[in-house]
Image (cartoon, grey):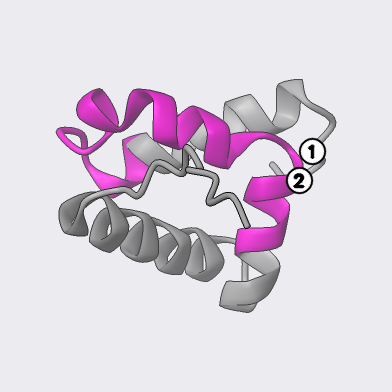
């Protein structure tokens, strides 16, 4: 049996911690459960944006980072305001 290598990019611990905290703060702002918040952010491409722009997002306040994620989600069909 041939072993295939997979190209799975695993984020570092700081990125994971930031993502968890951001989802938690997003859920509080919009009165959602954390799973609902994650599903919303993921469905409307906010997670892709977060992964791509983590280096700049993590230097901002959570409020500013959430505003940016929210804008991305809105541009991809999300209805939260």
Confirm whether residue 32 shows in the render.
no
Magenta region includes residue 55: yes
Q: Which mark is residue 43?
A: 2
The residue lying furthest to the front in this view is 1
Q: In the figure, is residue 23 to the left or right of 2?
A: left
* Mark 1 in CB contact with mark 2 (< 8 angstroms): yes
The quadrant of the image that shows the C terminus is top right
Rendered residue at 36%/24% (across/down): 53
Crowding near the residue tagged with mark 2, few <14, some 14–19, many ≥20 C-alpha atoms within 10 Å: some
Tag count: 2
Q: Is mark 1 on a helix, strand or loop?
A: loop
Position above or below: 53 against 66 = above
Query: Are there few (<14), some (14-19), or many (20+) residues within 10 Å of tag 1?
Result: some
The foreground one among 63 and 21 is 21
Which of the two labelled residues, at mark 1 and mark 2, occupies the earlier sequence position? 2
Give the quarter of the image for residue 55. Answer: top left
- Residue 56 x/y as whole percent: 23, 24
Question: Does 44 appear above or below 17?
Answer: above
Q: Residue at x 30, y 58 (%)?
A: 16
Residue 41 in picture, x, y percent from top left:
63, 48
Q: Residue 78 got which mark?
A: 1
Q: Can residue 19 be seen in this view?
A: yes
Q: Which residue is drawn at 57% across and 75% down?
A: 34
Q: Which range of residues does the magenta coloring cover?
A: 38-64
| Residue appearing at x 46%, y 61% in the figure | 23
Residue 53 within the magenta-colored segment of the rendering: yes
- In three-dimensional space, the C-alpha distance between marks 1 and 2, rounded to whole angstroms, equals 8 Å
The percent position of residue 9, horizontal first and vertical second, equals 39, 41
């Amino acid at each position: 049996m041939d072993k295939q290598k997979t190209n799975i990019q695993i984020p570092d611990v700081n990125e994971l911690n930031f993502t968890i905290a951001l989802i938690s703060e997003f859920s509080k702002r919009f009165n959602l459960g954390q799973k609902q918040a994650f599903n919303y952010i993921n469905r409307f491409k906010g997670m892709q944006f977060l992964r791509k722009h983590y280096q700049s997002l993590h230097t901002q306040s959570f409020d500013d980072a959430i505003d940016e994620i929210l804008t991305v989600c809105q541009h991809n069909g999300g209805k939260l305001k």
